[in-house]
Amino acid sequence: MTPFVWQCPRPSVMGIVNVTPDSFSGGGQFYDVGGAVDHALQLVAEGADILDIGGESTRPGAAVVPLDEELRRVVAVVERVAKQTTCPISIDTSKAEVARACLAVGATIINDVTGLRDPAMVELAARTGAGVVVMHMQGDPRTMQLNPTYGNVVQDVSDYFTERISTLTDAGIARSAIALDPGIGFGKTLEQTLQQLRELQKLQSFGLPVCLGVSRKGFLGQITGKPRTERLAGSLAVACFALAQGAAQILRVHDVAAHADAVKVWRHVS
């Protein structure tokens, strides 16, 4: 077993493939296996460096998807995509059983919004050497936006990552396999989100890649008044701000082509 090593010589673009009927953005559009596979391959053609495939919505208020249903949604998609591209595949799930099945058919990364709270997920990642994206979320998707409360959101998230990194490495997960996701919009108010973004560069002190997911999120709608389908400009603005600060190494996005172009241009002018 060779542990996964995050390699982000330039900021990487992680393309989102939602295989759900009710996701925050794109739900239902690529719900069938064929449509999801075609969409994933299109994202690779547009410049995706990583594909993030998920079968359970994590939008605010989202209900838990039963295990059998989540397996039905994603395993065949991961398997078919893995046979048609060398692009690394991340499985976006908090269920160890789903991650195990997807790793068996070609995924190499686990993207867990709960930060690998489940010991079974930790054991799986350690045993297989999978890469992991460890996200911060206060509460769960059903409750996270009810009353987010922090002493200082930036410090609290940093403390959380200190604990998670220690726990995961003690369990046998290689430090080089870990990426951090500050969980923008996951249990945070607008002001807490803006504070996180302004001070995002502080997470570089961990020496690990930071995965930034702001694409089409609700705080952009609060600022601009635009619906989800019209938030590309806002998404790009935050992405470029983070790149300019050296604060993010992975951009998790819906609009791959536009973000891939933004990264190319940023590299030439920086």
Image (cartoon, rainbow, N blue to C red):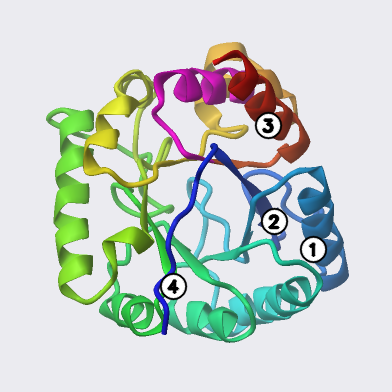
Label 3: which residue?
A: 259
Q: Percent position (x, y) of residue 98?
A: 52, 79
Q: Percent position (x, y) of residue 172?
A: 23, 76
Label 4: which residue?
A: 130
Where is residue 17, by image quadrant? bottom right
User: What amino acid is labelled 3 in the image?
Assistant: His
Q: Nearer the viewer, mark 4 or mark 1?
A: 4
User: What amino acid is labelled 2 in the image?
Assistant: Val
Q: CA distance from mark 1 to mark 2?
A: 7 Å
Q: CA distance from mark 4 to mark 2?
A: 19 Å
Q: CA distance from mark 3 to mark 1?
A: 20 Å
On screen, 254 above or below 267? below
Residues at marks 4 and 1 touching, judged by CB atoms closer than 8 Å:
no
Q: Is residue 129 left or right of residue 216?
A: left
Badge 3 marks a residue whose secondary structure is: helix
Q: Is residue 242 left or right of residue 256?
A: left
Label 1: which residue?
A: 36
Q: CA distance from mark 4 to mark 3?
A: 26 Å
Q: CA distance from mark 4 to mark 1?
A: 23 Å
On screen, 102 above or below 92? below
Residue 230 at least partly seen: yes
Task: Give me the residue at 34% from left, 34% from top.
Answer: 188
Where is residue 113, by image quadrant? bottom left
User: What amino acid is labelled 1 in the image?
Assistant: Ala
Sequence-first disc among 2 and 3: 2
Badge 1 marks a residue whose secondary structure is: helix
Sequence-first disc among 3 and 1: 1
Q: Which residues are magenta?
A: 234-250
Label 2: which residue?
A: 17
